[in-house]
Amino acid sequence: MNTRFPSSRMVPFYFPPSKCALWNPTPIGDFTYLRLNYYRNPKLVVTEKTIRLAYRHAKQNKKNLPCILLGSLTVDEDEEGVTLTIDRFDPGREVPECLERIPTAFLPGDFLIPCKVHTQGFCSREMLVHNAEDFSSAFKALQHHVCSKDSLDYSKLLSLRTHITSKESLDNIDFDFHWAAVTLANTFRCTPVKPIPIIPTALARNLSSNLNISQVQGTYKYGYLTMDETRKLLLLLESDPKVYSLPLVGIWLSGIIHIYSPQVWACCLRYMFSSSIQERVFSESRSFIIVLYSVTHKEPEFYECLPCGSITDLQFQLLTNQETVHLFKNVEPSDKNPIHFELSAESQNVEAQFFNKISKNLSTKR
């Protein structure tokens, strides 16, 4: 049965009676992959002042101090990765109903990193940053954000914790950092295809204009795609109620330069796993459509996007880093030379073994 819905032209609309061959899948260029760490591992940039504050606070209080580090996650300029800049220390405060401390001062857009600081010498190199409950909470938080109607925030697709141990000797302090992050491993393959006709609604005209909503609001925008019976795409805003009742064939994005941006990956995850979307219509190859209004192209770009692996399971991965940093005592911290780390999936330490054990016991279905 055809699905009928109103358009801005006030003419009855119908989804194509056949859900086969909705668009031409012939590639017109090379494919590319989407995943948070496909092209570049996430980078951490930590100010020296933040580390010294955490250390001083731990020394004054107790040897194994729970606290919070705060920062902001941004997409790199070339859109091939993300960088987390950590520039604030917060001792946190205890709240009766919360298992963990919460920040005493929290700003919109803040990225929270639960942290423990040891001041009684180095711990074992094989220490665990997460316990089973931490991993479970991270899985649930990632699943909730991808599946919910909450405003999509790619920074909520990375959950990070750290343990810092320190050891003083003469004029030096050696800090041993253990970073561990949980993120989603779901990957998409995007192939450029020939343009598909778009119904010229007010939204479509706005996105093609020199002053579209992304430029006016200074942020990227995304929404969904459906199709009328002539196989023309109808663009819908993310907030349009019709999104939750119509068959959808993909997503559109505006204000992004490259298809491989982490923001495109985040929107693909929301499209695939949103619990509010009633019907997704895939091509014969299990693909959906992405229309990208790039800031560097006058005309929209069209891609066929293929989920790699399961289209019903969320897949998780662990990214870690373990490094020792040497700082001088009694030296004013300089923010000109922050400390750099890189999160990688390559390590097979005890944290990775524990993560594999916990994630095997978990099956997260859409």
Image (cartoon, rainbow, N blue to C red):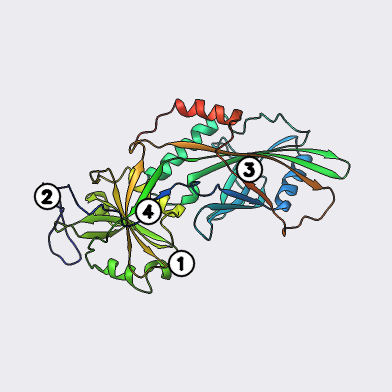
* Residue 19 x %, y %: 17, 47
* Residue 252 x %, y %: 33, 58
Give the CA separation, mark 4 to mark 1: 30 Å
Q: Is residue 179 left or right of residue 256?
A: right
The residue indicated by pointer 3 is 93
Foreground: disc 2 or disc 1: 2
Q: Earlier in the sequence, mark 3 or mark 1?
A: 3
Give the CA separation, mark 2 to mark 1: 39 Å
Can the viewer see residue 307? yes
Foreground: disc 4 or disc 2: 4
The residue indicated by pointer 4 is 30
Which of the two residues, 322 or 272, is positioned nearer the viewer here?
A: 322
Amino acid identity at mark 1 = Gly
Foreground: disc 3 or disc 1: 1
The residue indicated by pointer 2 is 17
Residue 333: mark: none
Amino acid identity at mark 4 = Asp
* Residue 31 x %, y %: 38, 51
